[in-house]
Image (cartoon, grey):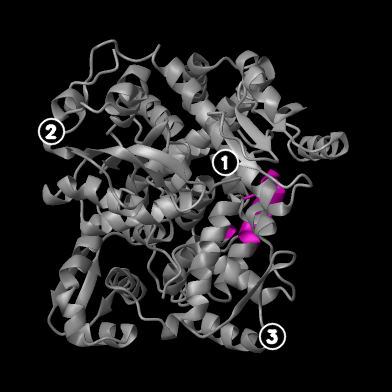
Amino acid sequence: MFLTNKRQSEIIRMLLENNHSLTVQSMSQIFEVSSRTILYDMKKVKSYFDSYGIHMMFSRKTGYGIHKEDLQKLHEIYTLQGEIEELSVEERNWMIIIKLLEYHSRTYQSLADDLKVSRQTVINNFKETEKIANSLNLKIVKEKGKGLLLKGSEFDFRNAFNNLLFSRHLNQEILNRLHFCYCEPNITIAKQIISHVEKRLNIHFLEITLLEIEICFGLYQISKGRTFDDNDLNNQLMITESYPMFKAYYETLDLLPISYIEKIYITSLLMGAKIKNNSNVLDTSEESVSIANYLMEKLEILHPLKNDEKEKFIKGLTSHLSVAIYRIKNKIPIGNELLEQIKIMIPLIYEYTKVQLLECERIYGLNFDENEMAYIAMYIASAYESSLKIKLVINILVVCSYGNTTSTILHSRLDQNFSDCKLFGPISKEELSKFEKINEIDLIVTTAELNLSTKQRIMVNPLLNVDDLDKIRSAISQLSYAKMCNEFLRKYRTTRDPDEITIGNLMDDNCVQIIESCDTWEHAIKLAANPLLVNQKIEERYIHKMIDAVYQLGAYMVLIPETAFVHAGSEDGVIDNCMALLILKKPIVFGAHNAKIVRNIVVIGNKDKETTLMLDLVDILSKESNRRILASDGITKEIVINLHSV
C-alpha cells in the first residue's frame, strides 16, 4: 500500500510527532487545501495504516489520532519504510535512475539487490528505464567489465535529479532512498545557505525541503569530483550579472568554499525556487511586468477590477512571473501538487488562463508548462472571485413552521455562521409561493418538508446541529461556484471567435452515445469513456483515475446544470487528445458526496497543454436552448453533433 502524495506522508509525520490528535480544520489550514481534500487524504492514510494493522482513532471533537500502543510500531514502519515497502514497476524504474545518478555505473545484479527483486525482473523492465533516461537527456550504455553506465553532461545529471524531485513520481518511498546525498553534513550546509539568503534578502522560501535536497545533491556531486566545466555551465544556464535578482542572490554565497561555477549553479537553484509573495522582493523583469499587465487586461474583459485590486494583482503576479520566467528560460523544473485539483476545481479559469499564456508564449518565445500555468491560474481565479464577490452572494430564504422564538433563533444562528450570505425570512410555508415570485432566492433552509418549491432546499433542526451546518456550507459553496461559472460563460461568449463551432467539430461521431439509463455514475463514466478506450485514445487506468477524481472532487466537475465534465491527469493514461459525450435520457445522481443530478457526461483527455477545446464545448452545452434539446425525448446523435454555440 502506497501513499499517493507528499501531503499524506506529512500527515503521518505530524501524527507521530504530536501527542494530541489532529483535526480536519487544522490540517486544512496547514496545507492550504479544502476539508474535502483532507478527508480524501485521511481515507488513504487509514488504508495505509490498516495494511500494517495500525488503528487510527477518530473523534468529532478532537480529530484523528493513534493509539499509544501503535505509535512505536508506526514509527518503525515510517522510519524504515524505504527498506520494507515493495515498489511499483514505475517506482522501480525511477529508483534505477537514482542509483545510476548515485554511482554512475551498476550491474543488473547490484540494481536487483538494491531493489530487492530478481535480476530478471530488472532486465524485463529495462526498456522503460532507458526511455526515462532518454527523456531526461541521459543515456544508459552497457560496457563490458563495467556494467551499466549513465552518460550525459554534469548539468544533465543534476537536472535529471531535480526533475525527479518536482515530478509526480516522487513519493515517500523514493524520498527515503535519497540518504546518499540528503544527509549530514550536506543538510547542515544547505540549511545555512537557505537561512542566510532569507535573512539577507528578506524573503521566505516555500517547499524548503525540496530546495535543501537540490542543494544537497549538488554538494554530493562536488564531493565525488563531479563538477561543471566552463562550457557545460555557460551553454546551459542563461545567467548574467545583468539579469534581475542575480547579483543579490549570488552575493549571499560569498563565503561558501566552492568554485565560482558551483556558486552560480546554487544561485540558479535559489533564483528558481518558489518564494512567498513579498512586495519588497528584488527587481522584476520587463517581460514579467508586460505579461502581468496583459493577463490583467484579459481578466478585466471578464470582470473589471477596482484600482486597489489591480495594484494587488499586478504586484503579486509580477513577483511570481519574474521567478517563473527565470525557471522557464533555464529549464528549472517545478512541481505543483495542486495541478489536477486546479484543473478540476477551477477548470474554466484554468482553460482561459491557458489560452492567454499560449498567446504569451508566441509573443515572448517562452514555454509555460502546466505546473506554471496552474499557479498563474490560481492568481487569476483569486482576483476574479474577489472582484465578483457581490455578484456571488447567495440569497437564503428561511422557512420555519415553529413559533417566533424558535424562528428568531434559527435566523440568528444562520446569520452568525453565514454572514456573507443574504438572509430572507423567516416566513411560513403558506407564504412561500408568493415570496418566491417577487424575490430571487438561491437556497431554502426549512424546518419542514416542502414540495412546492423548485429551489434547492435543506431541511434542518431549528437549533442547527453540526451536520446541518456542514450541509448548508456545502450547498453555499456549490451555488457560489455555479454562479461564478455562469457569470464567466456569459462574459466569455462576448470574447470568443464568432465562427460557428459544433460538437461534431470537437469529437468524432462514434464518441457520442445516447442511452436510456444507467445504474450508477461510476458505470456511466465507464460507458462514456468506452469509445475512447476502443479507439486507443486512453488506457484502462485513465477510467479508474477519473472515478477516483470524482470521489475526491466530484461536485466541481458539474460546471453547468445537468452536465459533468470528467477527466484525470495528462499522465494518468491519456494517449491522445480526445473527448466523448454520453447522454442519459433518465438522469442519475452524480458523485460520492454533495451529489448532483446529471444527464450528460463529458469525458476529456488532454495529452498536451495546447489543446483548448474544453471552453468551446462548455460554451455549446451551457446554452439554454441546447440543454433543452439534449433533455428532449426525440434526441438523436445527428442532432447532437450539429449543436453549436452561435
* Label 2 to label 1: alpha-carbon separation: 58 Å
Q: Circle 3 sits in a helix, a strand or a loop, which is it?
A: helix
Residue 9: in magenta span: no
The residue under label 1 is: 247
Q: Are the residues tagged 1 and 3 within 8 Å (C-beta)?
A: no
Q: Earlier in the sequence, mark 1 or mark 3?
A: 3
- Hey, which residue is sitting farthest front in the picture? 430
Seen from the viewer's position, the closer of residues 179 and 450 is: 450
Q: Is residue 258 visible?
A: no
Q: Earlier in the sequence, mark 2 or mark 1?
A: 1
Horizontal relation, residue 67 to residue 375: left or right: right
Most prominent secondary structure in the magenta stretch?
helix
Residue 68 badge = 3
Q: Residues within 10 Å of mark 1 (few under 14, many from 20)?
A: some
Horizontal relation, residue 423 to residue 261: left or right: right
Of badges 2 and 3, nearer the viewer stands 2
The quadrant of the rendering that contains the N terminus is bottom left
